[in-house]
Image: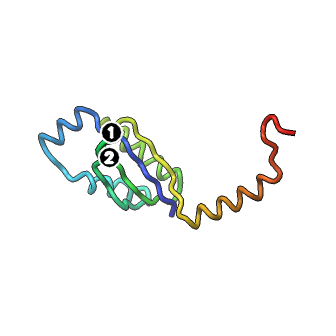
Amino acid sequence: MPIYISRGRFTTDAVKGMMAKPENREEAVASLFKSVGGRLIGWYLTMGAHDWLVIAEFPNDRAAASAVLAAAGGGSLSDVETTLAMTAEDARATFEAAGKVAKEFRSAGRS
């Protein structure tokens, strides 16, 4: 299954609520992802521009987007970004395919 990496921030209210009543968000996120056919690989609290990062597998983009949107729609998250991650073998195959189609593509402003 394709791997997706999502990261974002907690809202101020979410941070206040979790400080008042700490909870393990990994369990809730894993359950949400499973409900759309996905699997949580890892959940991390991070420092810097983002507060959290999750790595997961989903059967397709629609499943990944539905899970991320459901989580974001709860109101505790902001600035959510999701990226498709490719394995080294997937990347090799992608570059190979790009090399084939690039031979027939004319870039803008080129003859």
Place of residue 60 in the rendered image (x, y in percent of width and height, measured from the top left): 53, 56
Q: Which residue is mark 1?
A: 9
The image quarter in which residue 43 lies: bottom left
Residue lying farthest to the front in this orientation: 110
Q: Please tell me which residue lies in front, 38 or 100.
A: 100
The residue furthest bottom is: 89
Eyeballing the image, is 5 above or below 80? below
| Dot 1: element | strand
Q: Is residue 27 left or right of residue 67?
A: left
Extreme right residue here? 111
Residue under the image location 28 percent in, 53 percent down:
28
Left or right? Give the position of 39 relative to 111.
left
Image quarter hosting the C terminus: top right
Kindly indicate the quadrant of the structure image that contains residue 76.
top left
Label 2 element class: strand
* Label at residue 1: none
Residue type at mark 1: give it: Arg
Give the residue at mark 2.
52
Residue at the spot x=58%, y=67% of the render?
89
Q: Are marks 1 and 2 in contact (CB under 8 Å)?
A: yes
Outermost residue toward the top in this view: 12
Q: CA distance from mark 1 to mark 2?
A: 6 Å
Q: Earlier in the sequence, mark 1 or mark 2?
A: 1
**Alpha-carbon neighbours of circle 1 within 10 Å: few (<14), some, or many (≥20)?**
many
Q: Residues within 10 Å of mark 2 (few under 14, many from 20)?
A: some
Residue 106, percent from left and from top:
82, 43
Q: Amino acid at mark 2?
A: Trp
Q: Nearer the viewer, residue 41 or 96?
A: 96
Pinpoint residue 5: horizontal percent, then vertical percent: 43, 52
| Image coloring type | rainbow
- The residue depicted at 81 percent of the width and 34 percent of the height is 109
Between 41 and 32, the one nearer to me in the picture: 41
